[in-house]
Amino acid sequence: MKVSFENLGVVKRIDLDLSKKLSVFCGPNGTGKTYVCYAVYEYIRPIIVNSGVFDLDLLIKEKKLVISLDYDMLFELKKEYNKRLPLDYAFGVKKESFFSDFNISLNVDKEEFISKLRYSKFIFSLANENMKISYEKDAGSDELNIILENFESLDSSDSLETADVFQNSLLVKCLSFSSLLKVFILPVERNSAYTFANELAKNRLSSDVYSNRYPRAIQDTLATAIDLNHIKKQTSEYYWLAEEIENTILHGDVKVSENGELQFAPRRGRNTVLSIHLSASIIKNLSGLLIYLKHQARKNDLLIIDEPELGLHPDNQILLARIFAKLINNGIRLLISTHSDYIIRELNNLIMLSGNTPEIEKHREEWGYKEDECIKPEDVGAYLFNFTEENPSHVVVENLSVDETGFEVKTIDEAICNLNSLSEDIYYALKYGEDKMQ
C-alpha cells in the first residue's frame, strides 16, 4: 500500500510504502513526524461501507459462502479513502491555516491493484460479539471462501446489522489495502493516559470538551485506558510477546485489576502490587504496548508507536528493537518514529544478521540472536524528516536507502560525531594542557 501526503503542516511531501513490515521515521524535532503518524492512523482507521462484499444473513443460513470478488467496487472504495481524512478529528484543529493545502493521493493504478489482489493468498478470521467468520483466498483465484466458524443467536435486527457492518467493513479494508485489517497507535501521551485514566473517566470522551480538543489518536488512547475492564476479556495470540517484554525488560507483570485499574507487580524486591501512578516511567511507557499485545493485537494489524524509547535505558531500547523484529516477523506491521541511536543501530544489526553466510550464522549464534529477530532489508522502509536549506519552513522527507548493512540517519550520525569531537578536544585540553597539544 503506497500513499502520499502533501502540505501536511511543515511536511511538503512524503511518499510512504505501508506494505513494508517495518517503517522507521527519523529526523530532528519539529519536522512533522507525529503529524504523519496521526495522518496514517486516521487514514487506516475502520470505515463504514454502504454496500457489503457478502450477505451476512445468507451466511448464517448456509454456514459457508463462495463469492466472486468485485474488483471494480473494491478499487472505487480504495479511492474513496482519499476523501476520508477529517483533519478536525485527526489533529484536533480546523483545516484552515496550518493544513489548508493538505492533499492525499494513492500511488497505484487499477490494473496494478487488481493484479496484486488476484495473486494474493490469505486466510484470517474476524470475531465480534457472538460471531467468528474466517476468510480464505488462494493465489490466482477470484473467489473468496467465507466460513461461519462460531455463531450465537443475536438479540435483535440491530445486532445483526451491527455485525454485518463490522465484518464487511474490515473485510473491505483487508481486500483494498493488502491484507491490512486494523490500525493501533501509541502516541507520546500514552504515559499520561494510563496514569490519569480514573480522572478522565469522570468526564467521558463523548463530551464536547474532548470531541475536538485532542487529535483522534490521543482520544482513542484515552478511551482504551478507560475501557480496560472490557478490553481485558479478550486474549490475543500475541500474549506470549507481552510476557517476553515483562520477563526481559520489566521484570514484573502488568495487569488489569478487577475494577479496571492498571497495576504492576514487580518480581524484584517486595512482594507487592503497585498502582500505575506509583510505577517507574518505563512501566507507564510500555503499558499500552502490553495491553495491545495481550488483548487487542491480531495478524495484519498496523501498529504505530511514537518515540518507543521514552523512559528506557539504552540496554532496554536495544531489547525493545529485538521485540520489534519478532513482532513484524509474526504478522504485524510496525511504524515507529524515533530519535534513538540505540534502536536504529540495533535494527541495523538485525538487518545485517539476516544474511545467510557461515560467518553471519556464527555471530548470530555467538550473540544469542534467534531467527525471528533478524530483519530482511527489503522489509524495511526508512524516512528522514529534515528542513531544507532553500526553504527552512519546509520539510522534505527523504526515502533512505536500506541494504544488507541497514540504513544511515545522517542527522543522528552528525550529532554523535560532533559530540565525540568536542569531548576529545576538551579531554586533551584538560589532560595535557595547551603546551602539549602544540
Image (cartoon, rainbow, N blue to C red):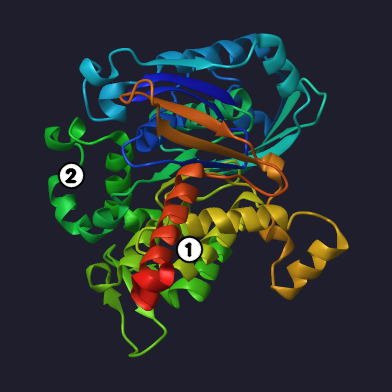
Which x, y percent locates residue 106? 54, 16
| Image-quadrant location for residue 407 | top right
Q: Name the secondary structure under disc 1.
A: helix
Which x, y percent locates residue 43? 44, 26
Q: Amino acid at mark 2?
A: Arg
Going 27% across and 68% down the picture, which residue do you hit?
276
Instruction: Kindly give the residue lying farthest to the right in the view shown.
Output: 358
Q: Which residue is mark 2?
A: 204
Which x, y percent locates residue 326? 62, 57
Going 41% across and 13% down the picture, which residue do you hit?
83
Q: Is residue 11 left or right of residue 277?
A: right
Question: As displayed, is residue 163 above or below residue 300?
Answer: above
Going 48% across and 55% down the picture, which residue do you hit?
341
Question: As displayed, is residue 6 above or below residue 326?
Answer: above
Question: As displayed, is residue 159 above or below residue 414?
Answer: above
Quadrant housing the C terminus? bottom left
Q: Is residue 58 left or right of residue 412?
A: right
Question: Which of 249 and 208 lies nearest the eye of the viewer?
Answer: 249
Label 2 crowd (10 A; few <14 / some 14-19 / many >=20): some
Question: Which of 106 and 404 lies nearest the eye of the viewer?
Answer: 404
Exactly how many numbered labels are in the figure? 2
Quadrant housing the N terminus? top right
| Image-quadrant location for residue 212 | top left
Q: Is residue 254 left or right of residue 294?
A: left
Picture disc at residue 317: 1
Label 1 crowd (10 A; few <14 / some 14-19 / many >=20): many
